[in-house]
Amino acid sequence: MSKKLPVALKPVDRVEILTLIDNYIDLLLPPSDIVTRPPIIKDGHIKADTLLAEHGLSLLVTVFQGENKHTVLFDTGYTKVGVPHNMQQLGVDLKAIEAIVISHGHMDHTGSLYAVLDHLPGPIPLIVHPGAFHHPRYTRSPDGALRLWPRTLVKDDLEQTHAQIIESQTPTLIADNLIMVTGEVERTSGFEKGFPNALMEQNGEVVQDPIADDQSIVIRLNGKGLVVITGCAHAGVVNTVGFAQKTTGEQNIHAVIGGFHLTGPFFEKIHEQTIEALKNLDPAVVMPMHCTGWKAIQRFSKEFPSAFVLSSVGSKLTLTG
């Protein structure tokens, strides 16, 4: 890959990130200079229906450059109902979505994919790491038992839908070269060891699952630096940001957004190292989501007082160059 670096990622003037699904929702959160919160009132009446939260992630990412605008869908949540329901509540124009990116093959990022594809008017690129189709995958419980993960990403089934599958382990440019999908992320930080209880079946044996299919989205904001958007960051959020720097040649980090997978006792051991590494990057915006976990989110809010943004379903983050 080094022969192809850096990737020619073009800068954008503005990026909008609309949270379609996340683990948390608070309809009473106030807006800020960069965050718009969803309205709860229409024509003077409090709405009778509301947005849904679930243990999953789905983001609508729109980039602007001059008169050009491009929108992609990053992940599709856990259930079949959450993302479509929230899209309707938020008035999302499905026709505007020109590509779908799947961060990895787990069920809490792929659950509404088929439902979304059913509602799209025509063919659409679906960017995935080839490892996202791997099955079976397991989690080992504390008593040693294997728990089988549901299979929600089936290549044969997807080929019967509007999806035009693009499999890549290396960085892929989409949206007129304004968005980069990282492909497989190099793991160099030393302290980010992956998900210890994740297992997979390979050649008839159950082995450690490195979740090699984990990938993220990267955008270059004009004059500000990189916006890095992770799904679960199973490769490590610090590794992911470092890989974004390496592949684009841009060292400034403006925003780090998404699931950082720092929940639970195993990952609590690396909270300090993660926070210190991100502090050294000095991002202007830190918006942890989904699998980051309550304890880690509390730490980020304390350690990044001016940069921290609390994620909530229906919120729209706007970053300008």
Image (tube, rainbow, N blue to C red):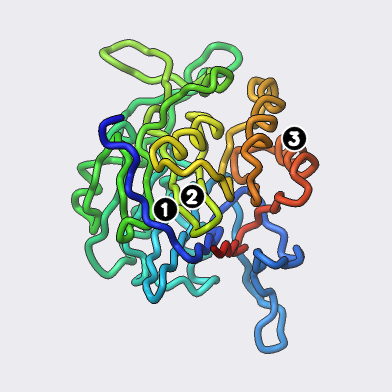
Residue name at image x 33 percent, y 44 percent: 7
Where residue 316 appears, as percent x and y from the top left, is 59, 64
Residue in the picture at 66% in, 42% down: 282
Q: Nearer the viewer, residue 21 or 185?
A: 185
Disc 3 to disc 2, C-alpha distance: 22 Å
- Residue holding disc 1: 112
As drawn, 144 above or below 294: above
Which image quarter holds the C terminus? bottom right
Contact between labelled residues 1 and 2, with CB atoms less than 8 Å apart = yes
For residue 295, the mark is: 3
Q: Nearer the viewer, residue 72 or 68?
A: 68
SS label for mark 2 = loop
Please tell me how crowded label 3 is: few (under 14), some (14-19), or many (20+) other residues with Cα within 10 Å. few
Query: Which image quarter: residue 6?
Result: top left
Expressed as whole percent of the image width and height from the top left, the position of residue 105 reads 39, 37
Please state which amino acid type lies under the numbered disc 3: Lys
Q: Amino acid at mark 2?
A: Gly
Point out the tag, 3 or 2, that comes first from the N-terminus: 2
Q: Which mark is residue 77?
A: 2
Q: Is residue 214 above or below residue 20?
A: above
Classify 10 Å Cα crowding around label 2: few (below 14), some (14-19), many (20 and above).
many
| Element type at mark 1 | loop
- Which mark sits nearer the N-terminus, 3 or 1? 1
x 64%, y 51%: residue:
285
Mark 1 neighbour class, 10 Å CA radius: few under 14, some 14 to 19, many 20 or more: many
